[in-house]
Image (tube, rainbow, N blue to C red):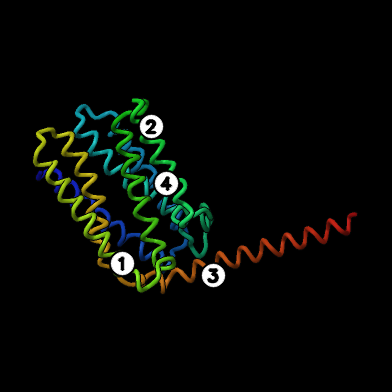
Amino acid sequence: MKRTLLIALSGIGYFIVSLMLFLPFRMMPVKNYNLVALPLFAGAFLFLLYKACTASQDSRGYLFGFFAGMVMWQLFGEIPSIRVPAGAVIMFSDMNIKVLGGYFYVTAGWILLGLLWKLKMLNSRVAFVFMIFLGIWSFELYMDNYSARVPMFMMGIIANTVLVVFLIISIYVLYLARKTSSVERKTVLGGVLYLTLSIVLSTAGWKQPQSFYLKYEVVGLQAELQEVQEELEHIKMLKKQMVYIK
């Protein structure tokens, strides 16, 4: 059980460190941050994935896979949609996978992962990497959208319900870890416990709208609105030119 708990806590520790790294760049965007962050996180992810696939012991492979899954989220879920004020690349992608409509792809991802796992068409360590990635994505979908989507009078009720459910699941995961003697299974359970404990800890901030969302999300929404307005003006210009040509 100790290994499972330590892995989960190390994941939470890494999340806190990465949060401290990303938040300042969202609040005070840094020029060319994307060009520095992308190769660093891409290199870290590829290294961890390589180690996960080539480690001689399954327990070590799953441990590398656990951290690969977390870095994978930051590489594909965070960095592409970070907007910086100036530089060679303002933003890598205007597709934010954390919008509420992303639930379709998350659901499809879980179904495909389950099928590939059942059919034994996917390496178990790689499957664990994607499980962590999809788990974080599922968690982020609610975390990034509840302030705008959940009515205020329901926030406390939902937060308390989620707290009880995932606290029970966390206790059950610890129970399974205590009962098993397999180091590999304890490692995998550590990744699952990380996901459930992250949700348990986050429910404290889900009882009211996120102050970060209220303060800083407006800037991003205004930029998106401006881009849509420019696209609309471009379409109107094209329509006028087509009429003129005819």
**Left-right relation of 148 to 44:** right
Vertical relation: 145 (above or below) 14: below
Mark 3 or mark 4, earlier in chain: 4
Q: How far apart are marks 3 and 1 (CA)?
A: 24 Å
Q: Check disc 2 and report the residue beneath it.
A: 115
Residue at image x 31%, y 64%?
158
Determine whether, in the image, residue 97 is placed left or right of residue 126.
Answer: right
Query: In the image, what residue type sits under mark 3?
Result: Gln
Q: How far apart are marks 4 and 2 (CA)?
A: 14 Å
Instruction: Say which quarter of the image contains residue 28.
Output: bottom left
Task: Of the two numbered discs 1 and 2 on the same chain, state the one appearing first in sequence.
Answer: 2
- Please provide percent x and percent y for residue 17: 26, 58
Q: Where is residue 118 in the image (x, y as percent from the top left)?
A: 33, 29
Q: What residue type is labelled 4?
A: Val
- Return the x and y of residue 132 as percentages of the image width and height: 31, 44
Mark number for residue 206?
Answer: 1
Q: Is mark 2 on a helix, strand or loop?
A: helix
**Tag count in the figure?**
4
Q: What element carries label 4?
A: helix
Q: Which of marks 3 and 1 is in front?
A: 1
Query: Is 85 drawn above or below residue 79 in the view shown?
Result: below
* Amino acid, disc 1: Trp
Q: How crowded is mark 3: few (under 14 residues within 10 Å), some or many (20 or more)?
A: few
Which-is-in-front pick, marks 3 and 4? Answer: 4
Image disc number at residue 106: 4
Amino acid type at circle 2 is Leu
Q: In which quarter of the image is the C terminus?
A: bottom right
